[in-house]
Image (tube, grey):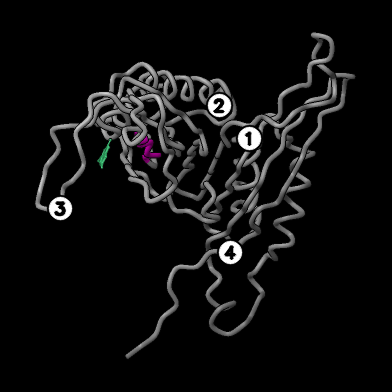
């Protein structure tokens, strides 16, 4: 029996970088969690302990902070692309680099109806995600969001499902639907230098949320398909959307023992277990995903 080294990758995970742009009295903030990872000719580091090809993870960290100043974080995707191309093009043993980001959004404080120049409140909603993978073959850019908690108190049904001897679930034509959405999307050919990724993000989020609200659902599965389809229709540069949605069950609480009617007004919000529904939607001419979904930090 022979034993061989398998896939390997390494980098610095979770550099917490806050970039302030303070060229004018009105500052701008970008608050991110950056992970970089290198893939390439690092066999010797594992097999013999020779670290001659290994650019330290500490160097990757220093580069992430340096690029936050020199490249800036005005565009998350362009920052990630600059880092990834630097590692591949300038560091000899590196064949492929992946840079992953989470963004924590801030909202300006309002003082007497006026937006403050340099104070913010953390936005409580979703975390935006970005991943750029680069090698000699090309560039793969994915975006996403997670922890987007949405709930609708009507417009959701679930019935007509398959039954066997263990099925006790009652069909319903009016239930709460709630989830903490994780969405990831893959861009096709876009010009990294000029494409407006922030506008695309806003349009995709709007499409997802408006479809969740507006689409009369017969199942979370159907809602996910409609949401993915709406996102691609809103931003035609997308070639794939992947959605993961825990079905945050809300059970009508039984008030009958107290002689009180409960017409879908009082619910028990259950914690676990939860149905976990996942679906992807692609265009029929989507190019191969390549390494686009090959994760590093597990956060993106
Ligand atoms: O939207 C749903 N999809 C399911 O597959 C399912 N299964 C279940 O018990 N409730 C639900 N709801």
Distance, label 1 to label 3, CA atoms, is 49 Å
Asked if residue 175 is among those painted magenta in the image, a careful observer would answer no
The residue under the point 47% across, 20% down is: 206
Q: CA distance from mark 1 to mark 4?
A: 21 Å
Q: Nearer the viewer, residue 104 or 267?
A: 267
Q: Which residue is mark 2?
A: 197
Dot 2 and dot 4 residues touching (CB under 8 Å): no
SS assignment at label 3: loop
For the magenta stretch, what is the residue range?
247-253
Q: Earlier in the sequence, mark 2 or mark 4?
A: 4
Contact? badges 1 and 3 (CB < 8 Å):
no
Q: Is residue 242 visible?
A: no
In this figure, which residue is indicated by the disc labeled 3? 166
In the rendered image, residue 253, in percent from the top left (x then y), is placed at 37, 35
Callout 1 touching callout 4 (CB < 8 Å): no
Q: Label 4: which residue?
A: 10
Indicate which label's residue lies in the foreground, 4 or 3: 3
Q: Which residue is mark 1?
A: 76
Give the image location of residue 100, x and y in percent.
57, 47
Residue 141 in the image: above or below residue 203: below
Q: Quadrant of the N terminus?
A: bottom left
**Can residue 1 be seen?**
yes
């Amino acid at each position: 029996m022979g034993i061989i080294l398998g896939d390997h990758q390494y980098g610095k995970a979770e550099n917490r970088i806050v970039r302030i742009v303070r060229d004018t009295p009105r500052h701008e903030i970008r608050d991110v969690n950056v992970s970089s990872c290198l893939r390439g000719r690092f066999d010797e580091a594992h097999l013999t302990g020779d670290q001659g090809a290994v650019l330290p993870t500490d160097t990757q960290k220093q580069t992430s902070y340096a690029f936050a100043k020199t490249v800036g974080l005005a565009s998350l995707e362009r920052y990630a692309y600059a880092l990834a191309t630097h590692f591949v093009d300038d560091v000899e043993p590196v064949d492929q680099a992946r840079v992953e980001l989470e963004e924590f959004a801030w909202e300006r404080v309002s003082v007497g109806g006026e937006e403050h120049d340099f104070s913010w409140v953390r936005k409580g909603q979703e975390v935006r995600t970005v991943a750029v993978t680069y090698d000699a073959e090309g560039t793969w850019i994915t975006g996403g969001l997670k922890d987007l908690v949405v709930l609708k108190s009507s417009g959701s049904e679930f019935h007509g499902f398959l039954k066997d001897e263990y099925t006790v679930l009652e069909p319903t034509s009016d239930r709460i639907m709630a989830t903490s959405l994780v969405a990831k999307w893959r861009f096709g050919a876009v010009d990294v230098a000029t494409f407006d990724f922030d506008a695309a993000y806003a349009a995709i989020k709007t499409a997802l949320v408006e479809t969740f609200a507006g689409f009369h659902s017969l199942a979370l599965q159907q809602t996910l398909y409609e949401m993915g389809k709406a996102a691609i229709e809103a931003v035609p540069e997308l070639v794939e959307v992947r959605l993961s949605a825990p079905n945050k069950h809300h059970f009508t609480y039984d008030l009958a023992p107290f002689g009180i009617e409960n017409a879908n007004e009082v619910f028990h919000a259950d914690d676990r277990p939860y149905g976990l529904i996942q679906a992807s939607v692609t265009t029929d001419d989507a190019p191969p995903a390549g390494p686009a979904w090959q994760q590093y930090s597990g956060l993106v």
